[in-house]
Image (cartoon, grey):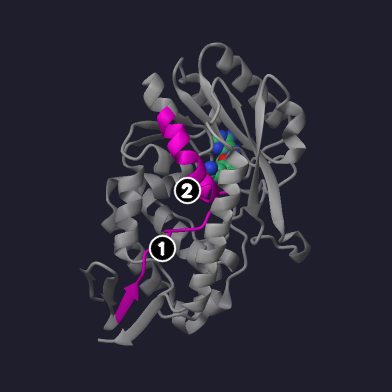
Amino acid sequence: MTSKTHVNKQLTHTTYNGYRFGVTARRLFRWLGSKQHIVPTLAPALRAQLVSTGGRCVSLFYGSGALKQAAFAGATVLAAEANPDLVALHSQLARDPARVWRALLFLDSCSRRKRDGEGAYRRVAAASLSSPLERAARFLWLSSLSWSGMWRVNSLGAFNVPPDRARLARPWPFPGLRVFERAGQAVRSTTFVADWREAFAAASSGDLVLADPPYAGGFVEYTAARFTESDQEDLAAALQRAAARGVLVAAFNSPSAARWYEPPWVRWPITRSGRVNVRAARRGDVSEFMATLGWQPKGDLTAAEASQQRRSAAAEEERRVLPCKLVASRS
Ligand SMILES: C[S@@+](CC[C@H](N)C(=O)[O-])C[C@H]1O[C@@H](n2cnc3c(N)ncnc32)[C@H](O)[C@@H]1O
C-alpha cells in the first residue's frame, strides 16, 4: 500500500493504492447535536465574554466541540465527554493526526470493504479493540460509512447504526489528511475527563461553562448510560449554584427542558435543521434554546440567527448544485 498527500490552495490531493483523490474542505465527522449551526452567531459573543473576565472555557458535553473550537481556538479548555470512542479520537488527533489517518488507511485496506461491503462493516463494528489508536480509526471508518454519518450505541455501548450502501461502495469515502490536521490542531489544547461533574467541579469564578447535554426528550444514544430526566434536573441545579459563585453559564436544551431553566435564567430561542432524524415526519426545523446566567449575548440573537440560517440555506443550495466533492481517478 502506498499513500502520498499533495496540498495546494484549493484542494488536498491524496494518492492511495494508485488512486488519486481530491477532497475539498470538510468536517472530519458528523455528530448529532453539534452546535455548528450557531457558531457564527454565538462564537464572537462567547469569546468577548471570556476575554473580559480572563477566565477559561469549561465544556461539559464536548461532542464535536464545534462551538468551543470556533470561539476559543488555541486557548486551554477543560472538557468532559462520556463517549469513549469519541474521546479516543480527539486524544489521538491531538497527539498525531497523520498517525490517525494512516491507521484509518490501514483499517480500510484490511477490512475487505470493496469485496464484502456490509459483511466488512459488521465485522469492523463488532471488532474488539486493543488501543486508543485503533478505536479512533474505527470511529472514523464507521461514522464515514454509517447511515447519515450517525454514531449511536445500544445500552451495552455497542455501535448500532446501519451502513450507507452508497458510501460503502465508494473508492474513498473518508476525509483527506488536511482535514485530520485541522481537527488535531483544534483539539490540541483541550484536556478531557469522562463525566460532566468532574469538569464542572473544576470551574471557578470568571470561567465560562458551556453545557450542551443530550436534549430532554431527544437523542440520548451517545453513550450506554443514557442521560435521564434526573440528570437534567441535577445539571440545571448545579449550573445555577455555580453561577451564584461567579461562574458564567451558557446551557443549551430543547423546549421540554424549559421547566428547569426558569428565571433567574434568561432563555434565548434558537432554530436548528432537523434533517437527521430516522422518522421522516420529524425532519422539519427544530426549536431549542440557550439559557444564560451571569452574562447575556449582546444584540438580537434571534435576528442574527435568522440571517445566519438564510446564509446557511444559500450555501447548502450551492453545495447541492456542485455535488461532486470527492474526485477519484487513476494517477
Ligand atoms: C448534544 S451533544 C453535544 C454536542 C456538542 N456541543 C457539539 O457541538 O458537537 C451531547 C454530548 O454529551 C455527551 N455526554 C452524554 N452523557 C455525558 C456525561 N455524563 N458527561 C459528559 N458528556 C456526556 C454525549 O456523548 C454527547 O457528545
Q: Which mark is residue 86?
A: 2
**Residue 324's spot in the image, x, y percent?**
44, 79
Examine the structure image and report whether residue 123 is included in the region drawn in magenta. no
Q: Quadrant of residue 196?
A: top right
Q: Which one is in front, 262 or 307?
A: 307
Q: Secondary structure at mark 2?
A: helix
Q: Amino acid at mark 1?
A: Arg
Identify which residue is drawn at 27% across, 51% down: 96
Q: Which mark is residue 26?
A: 1
Compared across the picture, whether 155 is left or right of 180 comes to: right
- In the rendered view of the protein, which quadrant contains the N terminus? bottom left
Examine the structure image and report whether residue 26 is included in the region drawn in magenta. yes
**Residue 265's spot in the image, x, y percent?**
66, 23
Asked if ligand 1 lies within 8 A of label 1, the reply is no
Answer with mark 2 or mark 1, whichever residue precedes in sequence.
Answer: 1
Asked if ligand 1 lies within 8 A of label 2, the reply is yes
Q: Residue furthest top?
A: 245
